[in-house]
Amino acid sequence: YLIFFFVYALRTFGIPARIAGTPAWNGVVEHGNHNWVEVYDVSTQSWTFMEPTPGSKITSSVNTEKNNNNKEELRDVDHMEKDPCSRWFCNSNRMDGKTRVYAARFERQHHGDGNDDSTLYYPMAWDITNRNVQGEDRTDYYTSICSLC
C-alpha cells in the first residue's frame, strides 16, 4: 500500500502522479504483479516512472553507486533523473513484450472522432474483475525503455 501513499503525497505538493504497474509479469499471473509511480515531468511534457519500493535494503550508511553519467547516487533512493535501468524491474527479462503495463487515469481517453475508449481500464491484481478504474496501456513505453537494459 506504500504506492498509494506516495502518489497521495506527491499530489499534496502539486506534483501530478499516478499508479502504474503490471497485473502479471511476462503475462503469467503466477509470476506475480507489481505497482509503481508515474510522475508527470513538466519539462519534457511526459510521464516518467519512479520506484518507491526498492528491491534491496540499505545495508550501510554509505550505499552509493555510479550512474550512467558517472555521478554517485544513493542506490535505493529513487528520483526522476535516475537511470531507468537501475530499477529492479526495468530489464528485458521483465519487459519482454508479454508483460502488459497500465497506468490509472481519472477519466476516459477521448479521441478526435468523439468516441470514448471505454474498453481500457486499470487491472488491479487484488481485484482483477473490477473494471471501474479507467486505465491507459503503457506497455509500449516500458518495453521500449526497459528492453534496452
Image (cartoon, grey):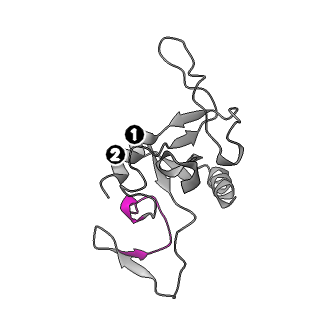
Task: Please give the residue where the numbered disc 1 appears in the rendered image.
Answer: 140
Q: Kindly state the secondary structure of the residue where label 1 is placed.
A: helix
Could you tell whether 41 is left or right of 126 in the image?
left
Residue drawn at the location 47% of the way across and 15% of the way down:
112
The answer to whether the residues at label 2 and label 1 have Cβ atoms under 8 Å apart is yes
The three-letter amino acid code for the residue at tag 1 is Asp
Dot 2, how many residues are within 10 Å of its Cα: few (below 14), some (14-19), or many (20+)? some
Residue drawn at the location 52% of the way across and 85% of the way down:
59
Q: Kindly state the secondary structure of the residue where label 2 is placed.
A: helix
Dominant SS of magenta comes to loop
Task: Please give the residue where the numbered disc 2 appears in the rendered image.
Answer: 144
The answer to whether one can see residue 130 in this image is yes
Image quadrant occupied by the N terminus = bottom right
Residue 93 counted in the magenta span = no
Query: What numbered label is drawn on residue 71?
Result: none
The magenta stretch is 72-86
Please say if 18 is above or below 79: above
Q: CA distance from mark 2 to mark 1?
A: 6 Å
Residue 81 counted in the magenta span = yes
